[in-house]
Image (cartoon, rainbow, N blue to C red):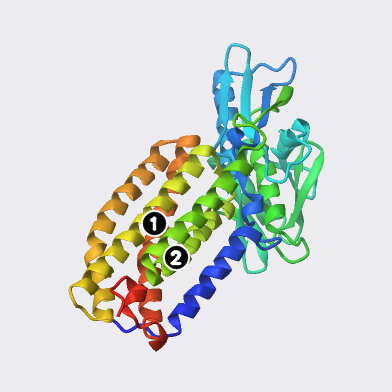
Amino acid sequence: MKRVGKPVIFILVFVIAAMSYLSFAGIKNTVIKGAQDIRFGIDIKGGVDVTFTPPAGTTVTKTQMEAAVDRLNQRLDANNISDRELYPDYTSNRIILRFPWQAGVKDKDPESAIKELGSMAQLTVVGPDKVTILTGEDVESASAKPVANGFDVELKFKSTGISKFSAATAKFVGKNIDIYMDETLIESATVNSQITGDTCVIENTGATAMTSDYATDLATKINAGSLPFKLVTENYSTISPTLGQNALNVTVMAGILAFILICLFMILYYRLPGLIACVALCGHLAGTLLLISIPHFTLTLPGIAGIILSIGMAVDTNIITAERIKEELRVGKTLDGAIDAGFQRSFSAIFDGNITVVIVGALLMIFGSGTVFSFGYTLFIGVIFNFIMGITCSRLMLKSISKYSGVRKQFLFGGASK
């Protein structure tokens, strides 16, 4: 085994502490939102029930209805709203949608929540001569892309829009092209050169100051404009949380209490390896929360169950390793030899148990949707962090701290008191 230096324990503790801070506090105006901005599902926070219809007097086909539903699905996916119900009623030309409240919504105003989806208007790209270059039907998708000075918005065109946009950009080099939603200007960009491919980028030049929220909002509006017809809100209502208003607070308090009790048990029973396991568990939880809050993933009750299950597996990982170290000390091995052998001999059992769960989580994500996807996602990332924290970081921290003479006592590692 390679030698692990004494400073490693401090470096890893600092990294885990930083991750823990970021996972709860986040960083303002960045993609790192923090736990306070996690989007919770309908079963925890409640949400909105809305019915959309085409404008009065508009005749739509089944294909157009399917296209509208597909576009709404794309927009909801772009906002990581996995806990939703969306289905068309072809008989009455209605689209029914149920989705959770956004993080930070306090007044529970359904009209504001619907507006958050963006204006269901018609998109037009207009040249400086006020002639329409493209419509929403020529745009495949739009997405926010992080760059050095902020965010850009990347547009991808359908085959019908490539030649139109190529001709327009050749004609209007050095001039502005405007993007409208109905009659409202939502963006104006300067053409730097002719664009012949199927993508173009609205660049953050500094003047537009595209933050993550601005770029995401612009991309969402552009995606909305490619609907085959305008959607009109027929009616809407609020949905109460199915678990009660205080369910989330109760869940969080129960989780904190359980975490404290687990840590007390680990420290009292396994001593120093138990203490290291608790630090690794903090890193495990922090990493999981970061990968939920950064993509603004919708956390549902099954998703919370996935987190709890992965933490249980992480505790099991540390218990197996600590027990192996105790056994090696009992048969007379030195402290360093017991630590090395303990991690080596526990690895195969831990790996087999965890890799099967990783496969299950991946399959749930691939073939599932909604709450099934939420459970699979949190379970998958939780077990991945178990490999990182429960196996790798725990080993490095334990080997590092064992280099200090003040703690080189077998009793502190589960051995007999001498």
Q: First in sequence: mark 2 or mark 1?
A: 2
Q: Kindly identify the residue that appears in the image at 29 percent across and 82 percent down.
A: 2
Q: Quadrant of residue 121?
A: top right
Label 1 secondary element: helix
Q: Is residue 1 visible?
A: no
- Residue 381 position within the rendered picture, expressed as x and y whole percent measured from the top left: 44, 53
User: On screen, 238 above or below 296?
Assistant: above
Q: Is residue 117 above or below residue 190?
A: above
Mark 2: amino acid:
Ala
Q: Position of residue 270 (x, y in %)?
A: 36, 66
**Depth order, front residue of 98/301:** 301
Q: Amino acid at mark 1?
A: Ala
Q: Which residue is found at the position 60% from the left and 57% from the top?
A: 145
Closer to the camera, 256 or 132?
Answer: 256
Q: Which residue is mark 2?
A: 280
As measured in the structure, the alpha-carbon distance from the residue carrying label 2 to the one carrying label 1 is 9 Å
Residue in front for this viewpoint, 230 or 384: 384
Q: Which residue is mark 1?
A: 314
- Between 196 and 125, the one lying in front of the other is 125
Labelled pair 2, 1 in contact (Cβ < 8 Å): yes
Image-based side of 389 in relation to 116, left or right: left
